[in-house]
Amino acid sequence: MKKYLKSFLLVLFALGCFVTTQAQDVAANANIDVMRSNGKIYVVMAVVATIVTGLFLYVYSIDKKISKLENK
């Protein structure tokens, strides 16, 4: 029973995210066009890439430290 409830909630959440994304696309396209014309979209993409890279490096370093402790 819990297995089906979790699956149902996951599908419901995914559907909600999809509908929300579709509704925001109309407003977001206008903002993206303005940012592209000003060249600011590249700054946003660079910031996002920097944050994601930092998170991956942090997780990698934590994984190395945990592996080192497990081997002891």
Image: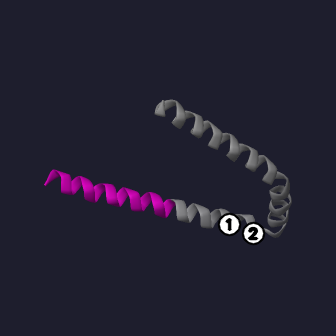
> Which residues are drawn in magenta?
53-72
Residue shown at 39% from the left, 58% from the top? 59
Q: Which mark is residue 40?
A: 2
Q: Residues within 10 Å of mark 1 (few under 14, many from 20)?
A: few
Q: Position of residue 2 (x, y in %)?
A: 47, 34
Dot label at residue 44:
1
Identity of the amino acid at label 1?
Answer: Val
Residue at position x 40%, y 62% from top? 58
User: Label 2: how many residues lie within 10 Å, few (<14), some (14-19) or many (20+)?
Assistant: few
Above-or-below relation of 62 to 17: below
Q: Tag 1, which secondary structure?
A: helix
Q: Relative to the observer, which residue lies in front, 66 or 48?
A: 66
Q: Position of residue 22 (x, y in %)?
A: 78, 47
Left or right of 61, for residue 38: right
> Distance from label 2 to label 1 (Cα)?
6 Å
Residue shown at 69%/45% (left/top)?
16
